[in-house]
Image (cartoon, rainbow, N blue to C red):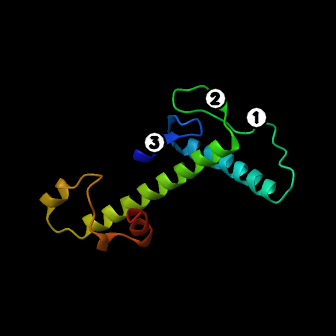
Amino acid sequence: DIIHKGTDITLSDGKAYHFSFSDQDQYQIGFLATSAKTAQMLEIMGLPTNETGKDYPWHADGGDCIFYSRQDMIIIGTVMQNYITYHNSYFHALRNYINEMNNPLKILEIKYGAEVPMRYCGDVYQTIASV
């Protein structure tokens, strides 16, 4: 599954790391990113964050578990969510396109990644695809 394979993400050190997005990864990264965003909002509001500097432990694929900065955890979570939204929206558009086809041979030619005519795409995918 393309979502579970994940993607490369460039962090604040300027280096790209690969992160997988299995169901468990999605849950944990989502939780950590939400915690980081909450701390960011508390700081903006002038309230204590109770961060210790060891608040966002995670790992890139094949890497050791390390503590990520608040900003890097927000980046990881945001990229993950955008990646999942893109692929879910594309899948639905592709499904709509295939469901309207009447030619079985044409259907067999369709592969994931194929261009989908916009009339088969929902609002979310159209917005993402236009960026």
Q: Which mark is residue 11?
A: none
Residue 85 in the image: state x and y as whole percent: 48, 58
Q: Is residue 128 left or right of residue 74?
A: left
Q: Is residue 35 left or right of residue 91?
A: right
Which residue corresponds to the image point at 59% horizontal and 40% vertical from the top-left? 12
Mark 3 closeness class: few <14, some 14–19, many ≥20 residues within 10 Å? some
Q: Position of residue 44 (x, y in %)?
A: 78, 57
Q: Marks 2 and 1: in contact by CB < 8 Å?
A: no
Task: Name the disc covering residue 54, or none.
Answer: 1
Residue at figure coordinates x 31%, y 62% from the top left? 94
Residue under label 3, please give it.
Answer: 7
Q: Secondary structure at mark 1?
A: loop
Placement of the C terminus among the 4 image quadrants: bottom left
Counting residues from the start of the chain, the first of labels 3 and 2 encountered is: 3
Q: Quadrant of the N terminus?
A: top left
Question: Please, what is the three-letter code of the amino acid marked with disc 2?
Answer: Cys
Seen in the picture, residue 102 relative to 62 is either above or below; the reply is below
Task: Give the residue pinned by disc 2.
Answer: 65
Compute the Cα span from label 3 to label 1. Answer: 25 Å
Q: Nearer the viewer, residue 99 or 74?
A: 74
